[in-house]
Amino acid sequence: MTNTLSPRPHALDPAELDSALRLANIPVLLAVTFQLTGDRGWLSDRYRPTRSSGMDENVTGGLTEEIQEEVRRGAAAAITAWNAGTPAAVPRPAGDVLLELLTFVNGEDVPAEFEPMMAELLGHRPVSSGVPPPRPTRRTTVLVIGAGVAGLLSSLRLAEAGIDHTVVEKNQQVGGGWWENVYPGCGVDTPSFLYSFSFEPHRWSTFFGKRDEVHAYLEAFADRHDLRRDIVFGTEVTALDYAEADGGWTATLRAADGTVTTLRADAVISAVGVLNRPKVPDLPGMDDFRGEAFHSARWPEGIDLAGRRVAVVGSGASAMQIVPAVAGTPASLTVFQRSPQWIAPNADYFRPVDGGVHWLMENVPFYQRWYRAKLNWIFNDRVHPSLEIDPEWDTGGRSVNAVNDGHRRFYTRYIERQLRGRPDLLEKCLPDYPPFGKRMLLDNGWYAALRREDVGLVTEGVAAFTPTGLVDTGGDHHEADVVVLATGFESTRYLYPMRVRGRSGRLLSEVWGEHDARAYLGMTVPDFPNLFLLSGPNTGLGHGGSFFTIAEWQVRYVVEALGLLRATGSRTMECRADVCESYNEAVDAAHAKLVWVHPKMTNWYRNAAGRVVAASPWRIVDYFTMTRHVDPADFVWSEDHASGGE
């Protein structure tokens, strides 16, 4: 990551600096200026930012233009002095000083428990694994399944640790879901500057990256670190079988031409993701439909929607990106919505990133780290208290506590403004369940699209296909030439459809059941030694945050575990059954107090029995703490282990 203590770039152009500072986030600039100068006057009440409203990054800090100008002048002087050779006065604030800075920059109290995580995110306190050097005689080979975000990161960290590995990827290119999903409007709902590796920044063209740029970022990451050399493309892992005799795994591989081979590895890292196997409803009459029908994740190359009658089945994240992107091209567009979504306004969704912002991040020390840290606070755990069910709170199921009810009122007013003059749409689009009961979505023109005369919103499910269209559950027929199934993914079927057989001979699908996966920290499962799951059960971010952040912590944990195997000469490590059981009891108990179990709606986090399988109940800071280091006592080791075991 650049800009922690980056070298002096060049002779500063005062005009260029002034122009860039006019685009700067003022609270971030205050943190930078304090670190450069050590002048506590910049932390006085005169310059104290206000709290961010909603998911707004609060560029001005709520300060008057006069005070903002003072901050810019002070920052310009400090940056110029630093560039001329003056060292930063507070290069790596930590402890109480860092907490004071965090609270000041965010305009609200940041509890002490966040200090270790934020210190790491800011680069002020790097975390070492603490793993001793490997024994020269102990060699470990690892199979990584998948070359998406987590798989690529795993390959990089394994290579850095000197661990032999092979990555097997079913597609012909890196990127995982970002290679597979090419539908119109596809992009992130997390700020671009969070949706990247903390150590590998990118010059994002928009504040919310679109599919092509995200995929290009991952391609460049693979090329820059020469990761393709360890990837076998166009090959799918269909089965994993553990062999007690040698403490290793045998993977059955199927190439694109149908050729079947096997590969042996001491350990396996599954990086197959969660939202990668489309869920296609089994609807009567689909084979008789004379038009084109496909899942949103399998968007046909070159399909032309102009002048055609298009139906979109679903109103979740994918549909919400597709509909505004294509509205106006088809002759008609019909959206089938089983339940409405809570949608947050965001003025930055399509906003391009000015070159001056890139200049700040690349030339001003500390700026990029602080900007990312501020986004982490706004989009992460800050919202978590509003998801906690207050048993004394009762609004007829519309909210779960007083703060959540405030969110409901705020988002309701937004929807009412967007649909003013269209009471028919307002009735269909206003949810009757609490905000955050499903993953919050960002308005990218959804309501504007629904207001169009050529767009229709149906609040019935789809019952069947006919040769010329769809029949809804109310019995009405809707003509269609193209049907887009934005019906989600097999989000509760982990590792599906792979067959995984463990130490006792039982299949993982038998241990879990088809839709009830459980793992310790979402990563390890008793009876399946040396098998590590990335993006495993109960690790999804339901309340906000970036998948990249969680991936970095999980990969660090797994590589540390593999390092312990090598360092101690152990053959295998297997999660203790009691540890896994206790952990999942805690997971379920925590979920019982959160909005996702609310009876007024369904979501893709829960299985048919109502248990939350996909989303994590923990705050991000909690998961950071849990996964910061491997506790050897959580595992059974195949050979003597000095630090713990049975």
Image: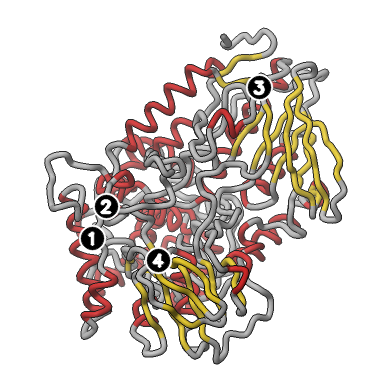
Q: Which residue is mark 2?
A: 600
Q: Which residue is mark 4?
A: 461
Q: Which residue is mark 3?
A: 564
For marks 3 and 1, the one nearer the N-term is 1
For marks 3 and 2, the one nearer the N-term is 3
Which residue type carries mark 4? Gly
**Picture layout, residue 501 above or below residue 111:** above
For marks 2 and 1, the one nearer the N-term is 1
Horizontal side of 580 relative to 70 (left or right) equals right
Which residue type carries mark 1? Asp
For discs 3 and 1, the disc positioned in front in the rendered view? 1
Name the foreground residue: 100 vs 567.
567
For marks 4 and 1, the one nearer the N-term is 1
Residue 344 horizontal/vertical position (percent): 32, 66
For the point 49% across and 68% down, the residue is 464
CA distance for labels 2 and 1: 8 Å
Dot 2, crowdedness within 10 Å: few (<14), some or many (≥20)?
Answer: some
